[in-house]
Amino acid sequence: MRPTLTLLALSLSLLLVACGDEAPAPAEDGASPAQATAEVAAQAATPEEPPMPGGDFRVVAVELGTELDEEGRVPRPQDVFTTVDTIHAAVVGVGSSPGLTLSARWLLEDGTPVAKAGQALVPDAPTVTTFSITQPEPWPAGAYRVEVAINERVVETRSFRIE
């Protein structure tokens, strides 16, 4: 037997020994033991999303650009940048909350992280929160995205390109 098959056979044997000799009892809802096991495995494999804060705060706009106005908004939104631009994301929120963390995660198209920043807020009126990225060397050309999250739960995503 090849080592991989031997290891697999040994693992299955240990699993059977660990489970015992008794057949699993049917689930209360009438599902078969295999269905019940599959449901438990699916629940374990699906990570829970972080909780949303109390209140009715929500993100209504994410503007990308190379400059900000006096209110922290992007006066000329764009989705294509040069390799030497500083890129700003103005996140417009409305509603209130007793407290939350608003964050921006900048990523390459393949999901490789570029930068992340967060700000604690206790909003009670419309807000504009800005996040910016820059670097001393030119940005590599390609596709990027920024994910805006409330308490680590992504609520908006904006794609952009650097050319």
Image (cartoon, helix red, strand yellow):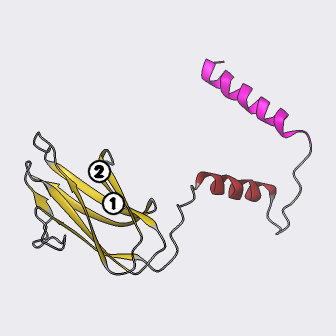
Q: Amino acid at mark 2?
A: Leu
Residue behind mark 2: 107
Residue at left 92%, top 44%?
A: 22
Label 2 residue SS: strand
Q: Which residue carries the number 1 mark?
A: 147
Q: Which quadrant holds residue 17?
A: top right
Percent position (x, y) of residue 161? 16, 56
Q: Magenta residues: mostly which secondary structure?
A: helix
Task: Give the left or right position of residue 25, taking residue 4 as reference.
Answer: right
The residue at the point 32 percent across, 44 percent down is: 112
Q: Residues within 10 Å of mark 1 (few under 14, many from 20)?
A: some
Task: Assign a secondary structure to mark 1.
Answer: strand
Which region of the structure is painted magenta?
A: 1-21
Q: Position of residue 29 (x, y in %)?
A: 82, 69
Name the foreground residue: 131 vs 146: 131
Q: Residue 73's spot in the image, x, y percent?
A: 18, 72
Instruction: Give amino acid for label 1.
Output: Glu
Depicted 20 relative to depicted 128: above or below: above
